[in-house]
Image (tube, helix red, strand yellow):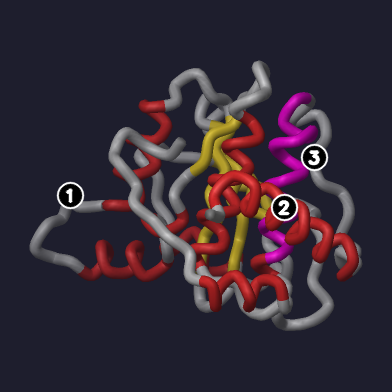
Amino acid sequence: MFGPGRVETYIRHDVILEMLNSEELDISCILWYQIVLHSILATNGVNRCAFINPQSITETVCVHDEQDKTNQHNNRVATEIAETMNFHQEKDFFLAPYWQSRHWLLLVICPYQRTGYILDSIKKAVEMFNEDFETSHPMTWTIADCNQQSSNWECGYYVLKWMREFVMYRQYAFPNNLWNDINPIPEKLLDDVVNAWMTTFQSKYMK
């Protein structure tokens, strides 16, 4: 569901409990949310989306590659994105959760238009984004008018909701239905997103 390589992953019970208790999301929660969304999309004959593995494109990886002077051509983030896009050439949109300075962003990458959209629930993390993040081809980035969180713990849950709404309905008319709501997401809706994930996760992956 990601690129051509095999992805081995697991999610710990304590991490799931943290998710159910609305605590800060571990990166494995984001990845497994993508896995569950992919399993839902697999039953849908019309899907224009693929996913970028968030573990491969964190700010830490970006900074390390920038500082690695021994290999000027080693950009693992750009390579990961390029390989995933080549592997899913039939897809129009790639959803890439991005972990930067203890904050989650969602990137919606549209390779055939060479454009991308940045969904940031506090709007200040975007200031550092372009300095750290590179793709294999120049792209035009647009900051989306998206929901803004009212507290300091919700960013990962906002990314979950944005991914779910994009793959379930927004992708089919995009980009004619850009984001235009900056209001906070009600906590009940965030709970619904987690509960829906948990139901599918239990039925498909828990033994």
For marks 2 and 3, give the one nearer the viewer. 2
- Answer yes or no: is residue 167 visible: yes
Q: Is residue 17 left or right of residue 74?
A: right
Q: Which residue is mark 1?
A: 73
Q: Amino acid at mark 1?
A: His
Q: Which residue is mark 2?
A: 199
Q: Amino acid at mark 2?
A: Thr
Within the image, what quadrant is residue 187 found in?
bottom right
Of the image marks 2 and 3, the number of the one nearer the N terminus: 3
Is residue 170 covered in magenta? yes
Which residue is at a point 62% across and 52% down the rendered structure image? Answer: 201
Q: CA distance from mark 1 to mark 2?
A: 43 Å
Q: Which residues are magenta?
A: 157-172
Q: CA distance from mark 1 to mark 3?
A: 35 Å
Q: Which residue is mark 3?
A: 178
Of the image marks 1 and 2, the number of the one nearer the N terminus: 1
Of the image marks 1 and 3, the number of the one nearer the N terminus: 1
Which residue is at a point 87% across and 60% down the rendered structure image? Answer: 189
Local SS, label 3? loop
The answer to whether 146 is drawn above or below residue 69 in the figure is above
Pointers 1 and 3 in contact (CB under 8 A)? no
- Answer yes or no: is residue 115 visible: no
